[in-house]
Each structure stands twice: as structure tokens, then as C-alpha cells.
Image (cartoon, rainbow, N blue to C red):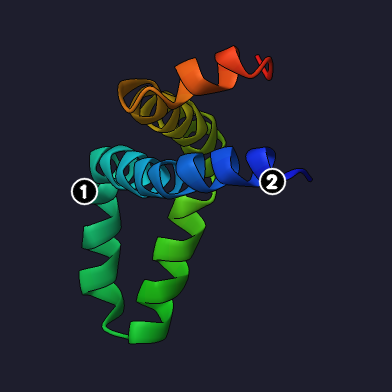
Amino acid sequence: MRILGRYVFREVLPGSFLAIIVATFVIWLQKVGPLFELLVRSKRAGVALELIGFSLLPILPLAIPFGILVGILVGLGRMSGDNEMVAMRSTGIF
């Protein structure tokens, strides 16, 4: 991977991870009601962690594309705001 590709990737990656975490949490909060009832009844930490882990798996196919999209928009928007995109266009990269 070229230097510029790595630079753009480093700009996009933190925003993507943050957006994936936030999207996962927001979607998970919608389905947490029945899960808390099971957690209270089980009274064991191991069962609680398993239930939380199993409830997060179906959410990831929704949260990952959203997080990547938001990370790209934030990263490239910041680069555009700092006129880095203009510099890349003037050198003939884009």
C-alpha cells in the first residue's frame, strides 16, 4: 500500500471504529429490555456475559457498514476542510 493510501486509511479508521461502537450500542439498547429480565433471573455473571455476546452478534451486520460509511465521510470531510484534497488534485493524484 502506498504512503497516501495508508494516510487516508489512518484518517478513516478511528472514525469508523467509533461509529461502529456507537451504532452497535444504539441498536442494542432497543433490544435490551427482555435481556435484562433474563439477566436478573439468571444471577450468574457468566450467563449474563454470554447473553450479551449472543445479542450483539446479529447487530454487527447492520452496524459495520454504517460505521464504515460514517468514518469515510468524517475522514474525507476533514481532509477536504484542511485543503488536503486540493493538494492531491493539484499533484494529479485524484
Viewer-side residue, 70 vs 54? 70
Residue occupying image coordinates x 33% and y 28%:
82
Q: Is residue 59 visible?
A: no
Which is more toward the observer, 14 or 5?
A: 5
Please tell me which residue lies in front, 7 or 89: 89
Q: Residues within 10 Å of mark 2 (few under 14, many from 20)?
A: few
Residue that label 1 marks: 33
Q: Is residue 5 above or below residue 82?
A: below
Dot 2 falls on a residue whose secondary structure is: helix
From the top left corner, tell me how far across and down residue 12 is, in percent.
49, 39
Categorize mark 1 by other alpha carbons within 10 Å: few (<14), some (14-19), many (20+): few
Residue at left 22%, top 60%?
A: 37
- Tell me where residue 40 sits by quadrant: bottom left
Say which of 2 and 76 sits in front: 2
Residue at the disc numbered 2: 3
Reading the chain from its start, which is encountered first: label 2 or label 1? 2
Residue 68 coordinates in the image, percent (x, y) = 51, 33
Image quadrant where residue 75 sits: top left
Quadrant in which the N terminus appears = top right
Q: Nearer the viewer, mark 2 or mark 1?
A: 2
Give amino acid for label 1: Gly
Q: Measured from the top left, where is residue 35 in percent x and y? A: 30, 56
76 with respect to 19 (left or right): right
Percent x, y of residue 49 = 40, 74
